[in-house]
Amino acid sequence: MVKGVSAGWGACFRTILLDKSPEVLTCWKDTIAVGLEFGSIIVLSAITGIQMAILSGHTGYVGTLVFSPDGMSLVSGSLDNTIKLWDMQTGGVVKTFQGHTDLILSVSISADCTTIASGSGDKTIRLWNIQTGGCNHIIEQNFIADYVCFSPLDPKHLMSISGGKIWQWDTSGEQIAPEYNGSHIIFSLDGTQSVVCDGSAVEVQDSDSKEIVARFHIPKPKKVRYCCLSPDNRVIAVTAGITTYIWDITSSDPHLLETFIGHTLFINSLAFSSPSSLISASCDSSIKFWQIGTSSADPVLTDPGSTPLDSAPTKSITLQAKDGIAISSHSDGVVRIWDLSTGLCKVSFQTPVKNPYQMDTLLTNDRLISVWCTDEKICIWDTGKGELLRTIDTPGDDVRDLRISGDGSKVFCLYKYSIQAWSIWTGEVLGKVIDIFGLSIDPFLTIDGLRVWVSLPSSSRLIMGLDFGTLGQSPDELPNRSWNGPHLDFVDGIREQRSFLPGIQDTVTGKVVFQLPGRLERPSDAQWDGQYLVAGYDSGEVLILECNCVLH
């Protein structure tokens, strides 16, 4: 397990990366239980994120978890068709409940801790006697039983979701009210309110009167996947895809408080650990801790009042560890400077570009310079002053990569079959090499501004060096060579579905010792200098890891 800092629109103050995908999480006070894809359950501190225990016993992924009301027990359901009751003091299995013939999709425990309800892919709901371990009743359904939930106020009142409808039962297995439309339902901790989701619509109801307390739709609209209510019943967290929306429901006119963006694959589960702290688990193999009410600001956007709900895809990432920063450039023209020590956005700038072919930004001599390529032109922009320094015509639009040299003096543009260099300050052509076929420019091998290395299409990661140091002469080609850097190296990873799965590789054994979560569109969207690793994703997230701990 590697801890890191994740930077995004929301106030994510901790990210925990796992070697297995978390399928579900649940929280009781300061304790988190996380079900993993290969059958284990890890127990974490909700305050520090430190792992406190591993519960082993299931043979298939754990897809549903719930704590007992007193926090002394944990109930889990698995792909192995079983339900287990765990003692949280010892970490041992108290009972295993068997009878379902398909995977367990949901479990719930009654308020009096006498009954466990389970919903399964075998189209049944089973009610289990905790004391004896026996099955009291089986409720047959026409559809898969996606979700079950006991009312915190009435231990005999059970809600379930099947076939896109919400059903109500008593513990004798009898339906006690007509079914109605809904894709998700939860109760507040005190049982006084329930939240019903249907598509993009969210309704909060009074549990006794069924009066609608609040109603709203999430943006775009998207289909709600999960939701949870804060312990003080003041806010609702709703997730759709990779985004979580935080709604204030304290008035008759609910309003969107914050949008949390950071995960790179869809979110599996949400849980509040306090009225202002939210935890999310995602298929990107990460768990994120969010603080409500402390989102990072973007003080120098052209219109701060129109900050978008979704951050635009990351076009480039620049790691400047000596300055303690990373710089991200996004397809909407926004440039952000991130603090490596905290993972927070220090400042944002708006440039005039939209959807550039390529883009790069560098802080040099206290000047923040951005370059981008669009409409067969390279634009050089003083981002801090908001001034266009110059525009350079380019030979074509088949641009593969665009990089500012490490000393800030040159801009290199890699095309399909050539590479060309210009002076940033004069716009003068400094050299051109044709008849090469390169994939990307190595950002860490342009430090002196004279030489540039281009990654070639080879499984051994051959790179070609070019020396642009002599004005008025053709650049000198340096010998092709294999990467001979440190024992561990950032690698492009495996190409899958037009994306790269990057990681850190042992250059002696060839083994990938650390895998980045999510997918990058190209390997140059991540940089690693041996201590810090930064990566930019299509979601707009910038991931910052101090990952020298993985070297040992």
Image (tube, rainbow, N blue to C red):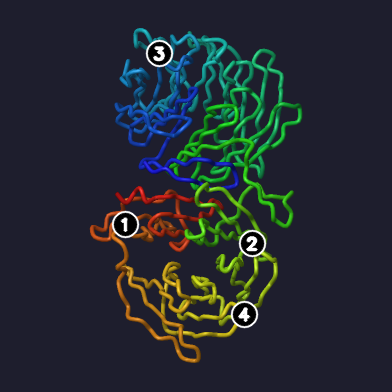
The earlier-in-sequence mark between 4 and 2 is 2
Q: Secondary structure at mark 2?
A: loop
Q: Position of residue 127 (x, y in %)?
A: 43, 14
| Image quarter (top left, top right, bottom left or bottom right) of the N terminus | top left
Instruction: Kindly indicate the quadrant of the structure image that contains residue 200.
Output: top right
Q: Residue at x 57, y 37 (%)?
A: 239
Q: Check disc 1 and give the amino acid type.
A: Gln
Residue that extends furthest to the left in the rendered view of this protein: 509
Q: Are marks 4 and 3 in contact (CB under 8 Å)?
A: no
Q: What amino acid does circle 4 point to?
A: Ile
Q: Nearer the viewer, residue 434 or 148?
A: 434
Q: Nearer the viewer, mark 4 or mark 3?
A: 4
Q: Residue at x 59, y 16 (%)?
A: 190
Give coordinates of residue 74: x percent, y percent: 40, 20
The relative height of residue 139 versus residue 17 in the rendered view (above or below) is: above
Is label 1 in contact with label 4 (beta carbons under 8 Å)?
A: no
Mark positioned earlier in the residue sequence (1 or 4): 4
| Residue 139 on image: x %, y % | 46, 16
| Label located before the other in sequence (4 or 3) | 3
Residue under label 3 = 128
Residue where numbered disc 4 is placed: 392
User: Which one is in front, 127 or 175?
Assistant: 127
Q: Amino acid at mark 2?
A: Gly
Q: Is residue 383 above or below residue 126?
A: below
| Mark 1 surroundings: few (<14), some (14-19) or many (≥20) residues within 10 A | many
Kind of element beneath mark 1: strand
Q: Kindly report the distance in space between the C-alpha atoms of the residues bearing marks 2 and 1.
A: 33 Å
From mark 3 to mark 1, how far is it between C-alphas?
49 Å
Q: Judge whether residue 65 can be spotted in this image.
A: yes
**Mark 2 lies on residue:** 333
Q: Residues within 10 Å of mark 4 (few under 14, many from 20)?
A: some
Mark 3 / mark 1, whichever is N-terminal:
3
